[in-house]
Image (tube, helix red, strand yellow):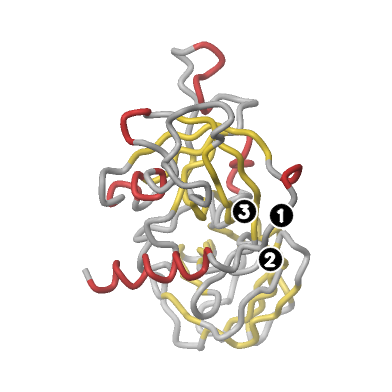
Amino acid sequence: MGKHFLHQLLAVALALFVSPTRSDDWLPATATFYGGADGSDTMGGACGYGDLYEQGYGVNNAALSTALFNDGASCGQCYVIRCDSSKTGWCKPGSSNFAVVSATNFCPPNWELPNGGWCGPPRPHFDMSQPAWETIGIYSAGIIPVLYQRVKCWRSGGVRFTIAGFDHFYMVLITNVAGSGSIQSMAVKGANTDWIPMYRNWGANWHCLAGGLIGQGLSFALVSTGGQNIVFQDVVPAWWQFGQTFNTYQNFDY
């Protein structure tokens, strides 16, 4: 309970860092909610983050429609969302109400509905956690028109690497990414190898096929979607095993 409360406080504090923007910077979309009153059913998801509190994302999260999710390339990105009071009377009272959310899941189209429903392409749609949605909308509305912008992500601590796989197949989950919030490319290097390119497998998971990495210390080179390049040198010791997570002290500014 205490950990969840601290994450909520952090989310509120970080929202204060969202810079004022011009009115023409806002893009139109729609928003619904899911996950229950405490947001607990938003854990997991198509980005592969699992426990969103443990991975640094918390309850202020959203599943993105096909147009926004971009086959997982948007995982971890941050958005500020406000109810469009010019189009509905279901906005939460108060002109300053907005939510800052991280993209942690995919909202798939429902092809039993025309054009795949709210999450069908090319609609921009946010299926937000209920706690985040209720900061901008009145519960009984169910769905509201919104305006949104992509904003800088603020995270506590450094980028984290979780290693999965078997034999010569290596998959690395990248979490707690600040700045642009997402990664556009990465590579891995063993203590005795050259740099080996990795490829997006699903969500925020990247993979490669390589021999000989077991028993070697590992370094990672990441490029954020904002274009910042960081080398995480020797962040994984030679005694690593599949299933372990390694924290770092470096993170992205953009």
Query: Given contact means CB atoms under 8 Å apart, are the residues at marks 3 and 1 in contact?
Result: no
Q: Disc 1 versus disc 2: distance between alpha carbons?
A: 32 Å
Query: Hey, what amino acid is under mark 2?
Result: Met
Query: Hey, what amino acid is under mark 1?
Result: Thr
Closer to the camera in the image, 33 or 213: 33
- Give x and y (percent) for residue 88: 50, 27
Q: Which residue in the structure is indicated by mark 1? A: 21
Q: Is residue 25 above or below residue 210?
A: above
Q: Disc 3 versus disc 1: distance between alpha carbons?
A: 33 Å
Query: Given contact means CB atoms under 8 Å apart, are the residues at marks 1 and 2 in contact?
Result: no
* Point 43% across, 31% down: residue: 90
Mark 1 residue crowding within 10 angstroms, few (<14) / some (14–19) / many (20+): few
Residue at the outermost left position: 1
Q: Which residue in the structure is indicated by mark 3? A: 200
- Quadrant showing the C terminus: bottom right
Q: Earlier in the sequence, mark 3 or mark 2?
A: 2
- Give x and y (percent) for residue 109: 50, 25
- Give x and y (percent) for residue 221: 69, 74
Q: Is residue 58 above or below residue 64?
A: below
Q: Which residue in the structure is indicated by mark 2? A: 186
* Point 26% across, 46% down: residue: 37
Query: Given contact means CB atoms under 8 Å apart, are the residues at marks 3 and 2 in contact?
Result: no
* Point 45% across, 36% down: residue: 91
* Point 57% across, 52% down: residue: 80
- Quadrant showing the N terminus: bottom left
Q: Secondary structure at mark 2?
A: strand
Closer to the camera in the image, 179 or 215: 179
Query: Hey, what amino acid is under mark 3?
Result: Arg
